[in-house]
Image: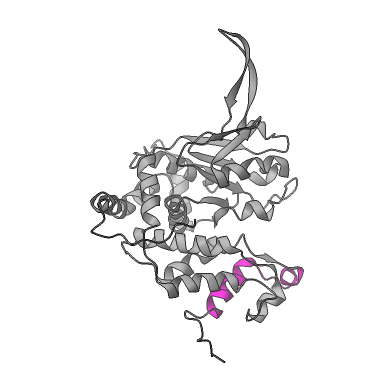
Amino acid sequence: MSTPSIPIREDDPEFEKERATVDKLHAAYSTITEELSKVIIGQKEVVEQMLIALLAGGHSIVTGPPGLAKTLLIKTLSQLFSLSFQRIQFTPDLMPADITGTEILEETEHGRELVFAKGPIFANMILADEINRTPPKTQSALLEAMQEHQVTVAGESMKLEEPFFVLATQNPIEMEGTYPLPEAQLDRFMMNIVIDYLSEDDEVAVVTQTTGEFKAKIEAMFTGQDLIQCQEIVRKVPIAEDVARYAVRLAAASRPGREGVPDFVNEWVNWGAGLRAGQYLVLGGKTRALLKGRSHVTIEDIRTLALPVLRHRILVNYRAQAEGVSVDDVIARLIDSVPEKAAAKVKA
């Protein structure tokens, strides 16, 4: 994520190819949402956030009660982008080798040999279902894959096929028998996308559609290579310094004990967002700008993505919990309290 921002320039020899991909992406955005609406009713904001994470090359946590089509949405996205898909059901007895794979003894033409059998992690899109139901040792098996896009087994490192995404689900209701994700792993997720209950009209539509004979067919619209190219183009979208500074100041304002942070942060927050928060706010802002047909990032892009990018990076304290203050409440107040432009520094 240290790639510098380079404007898409017409004198770039790759410009025609890149412009065609950008135009295709922008033109296809409404078609993508229409395709998804065949099986996913409502949840427009959730769909947009998931698309932004995919096009930015980031992993996501999807949090919501059971029965809200979290798994179906993720699988449908993999079909739209022609990505290989694997679902891993996380349970208390799941072992790291069940994810990465293991060496097994097989008969070969040279006799018995240890042969590596790939685990489900070797796919483009991984659904880590109920990731907080497995112990930290098994959760950590994802860390190297998420950060380095590789796994190490028996001292040998193996690259994962690109593009590679981990989308993890969490059930916020049933907390018995769960293991909270460590902060180091949470920080590797670009977004924490919350799925809420549908409106009455949308719920009626879901009930009607899922109890009838009609079964929607999803048409693939992109390939994995298209997705990789889009990710490269996203990083070339220019961003003004004041917008980048706003993203950094918004993340920094969540860190208690620092000079200039709002009083409510010191009162309610134990731990604030780190460096990755600013990086993902900018990267997400660039992606959202392209989806909206713009060639530049606005402060509104940053604000719109503040909730999904920051909510799993801020830890509220017991006082906040006692007063009924949620992480989302803290972020909403941060958005209201952090000015668009920093105050000018007075030279001594």
User: The C terminus appears in which quarter of the rendering?
Assistant: bottom right
Q: Residue at 54% x, 61% y: name it.
A: 309
Q: In this rendering, is residue 273 above or below 338? A: above
Residue at the outermost bottom position: 348
Residue toward you, 12 or 212:
12
- Image side of residue 49 versus residue 22, left or right: right
Q: Is residue 100 above or below residue 70?
A: above
Residue 11 is one of the magenta-drawn residues: no
Occupied quadrant, residue 233: bottom left
x, y percentage for residue 246?
49, 74
Would residue 18 be found to the left or right of residue 344 on screen?
left
In the rendered image, is residue 94 in sight? yes
Compared to residue 87, the image places residue 169 above or below, namely below
Region in magenta = 318-337
- Secondary structure that dominates the magenta span: helix
Q: Position of residue 70 (x, y in %)?
A: 53, 47
Question: Going by the picture, which residue comes out furthest to the front?
Answer: 348
Residue 329 inside the magenta-drawn segment? yes
The residue sitting at 37% across, 41% down in the picture is 225
User: Which residue is at the front of the view, 326 or 134?
Assistant: 134
Q: Position of residue 234 (x, y in %)?
A: 38, 56
How is the structure coloured here? Answer: one colour
Of residue 51 and residue 12, the one placed in the foreground of this image is 12
How many numbered marks are there? 0
Residue at x-position 25% and y-position 52%: 13
Residue 135 seen anywhere in this rendered image of the structure:
no
Q: Indicate the position of residue 281 as horizontal and vertical percent values.
A: 49, 63
Q: Nearer the viewer, residue 293 or 327?
A: 293
